Image (cartoon, rainbow, N blue to C red):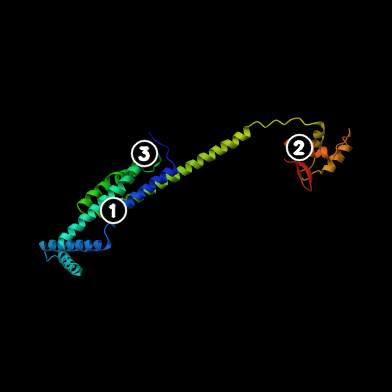
Amino acid sequence: MSAKLTTQGTDHIIGLIQQISKAATKTDFLPPKEKKLLDDYRSFEDYTNDIATAKKLDKSNKAVAKLLKSAKAQLKQIKTPYDQNESKRLKRKLSDEKIKHLNCAVQPLQKKLDLLLAPLWTELNKSSFQPRNLQKWIWGTFLSGNIMSLENNIIYDNQAMIIAEFTKIGHDARQAIRELERIRAKIEYENKKSADTEQQSGKAGDKNKPKKKLKPLSANAAAVYELLKDLPEHRAMKGGEILKALENQKPHKFIDQSTLTKNIIPELRPYGVTNKRGAGYYIRK
């Protein structure tokens, strides 16, 4: 069963991907002193291995000679005495902390993302400009794939592969977020277009609505309306002028000011008659 994809839903997916990416690539698990110690032990092991490898190769080769010389020089710069047992202990501790972090911090976020995406995949594929890549970036990296292999590389302390996984997770996060932002912009455009269409339909509907029938006017009100109807657009008539004009008509109509303002003008308001202070009464076109 698919659900409707919204801008808020897209933002939620982006937020979860950012959180998973940040949590999965976290590195500061050891106190600074222990981290420095482990870094020195790792460097010692790497340079020692380089030296051992170079010695097995043809030393007359310039590249091999250069590698051997460089490794020996770097090894001399390490001031920390190497302790193999302490190195193993720190590696174990770091591995345990990373696995614990993946289980406690990353996996709950993965579950949230999986539950959020389950009913939205159909809509995402329809809206995406590159649906296959989007599935690969999100599903392959953040719901299985790279996160799972990252755990294995942490267990076996495969530093080169851990760095490669970090790079892949960062790359796929950027690509997925960029695509989701494009989908979000597409949804916003379609929503605006739909709203504009509805608004235009509403306006057309208003125009097609039958105009409200006005009630017939009383004789006095009709006489006043005829006076105002014949005025030029820039003219208005004050109350006294209306009363005088009615008196001069044939048959004469004698109306007092109170009747005009309290009875006749309210009766004429639905016909557009209005009053502007200082100018008088007129019909609003």
Toward which corner of the image does residue 207 lie, by quadrant? top right
* Residue under pointer 3: 121
- Residue depicted at 82% across the width and 37% down the height: 259
Mark 1 or mark 2: which comes first in sequence?
1
What is the spatial separation of the Cα atoms under label 1 and label 2, in whole angstroms?
Answer: 78 Å
Toward which corner of the image does residue 140 lie, by quadrant? top left
- Residue depicted at 27% across the width and 51% down the height: 165
* Residue under pointer 2: 266
Q: Nearer the viewer, residue 44 or 126?
A: 44
* Residue under pointer 1: 166
Name the amino acid type tagged 2.
Pro
Number of the front mark, 1 or 2 = 2
What is the spatial separation of the Cα atoms under label 3 and label 1, in whole angstroms?
Answer: 26 Å
The quarter of the image holding the N terminus is top left
Q: Circle 1 sits in a helix, a strand or a loop, which is it?
A: helix
Name the amino acid type tagged 3.
Trp
- Residue depicted at 47% across the width and 44% down the height: 188
Mark 3 or mark 1: which comes first in sequence?
3
- Provide residue 52's location: percent of width, then percent of height: 12, 62
State left or right for residue 25 relative to residue 222.
Answer: left
State left or right for residue 4 relative to residue 53.
Answer: right
Name the amino acid type tagged 1.
Phe
Mark 3 or mark 2: which comes first in sequence?
3
Number of the front mark, 3 or 2 = 2
Give neighbour class at mark 1: few <14, some 14-19, many 20+ (Cα, 10 Å): some
- Provide residue 154's location: percent of width, then percent of height: 23, 52
- Provide residue 212's location: percent of width, then percent of height: 68, 32
Q: Circle 3 sits in a helix, a strand or a loop, which is it?
A: helix
Q: Which mark is residue 175?
A: none
Vertical order, 82 against 236 (above or below): below
Vertical order, 241 against 215 (above or below): below
- Provide residue 161's location: percent of width, then percent of height: 23, 53
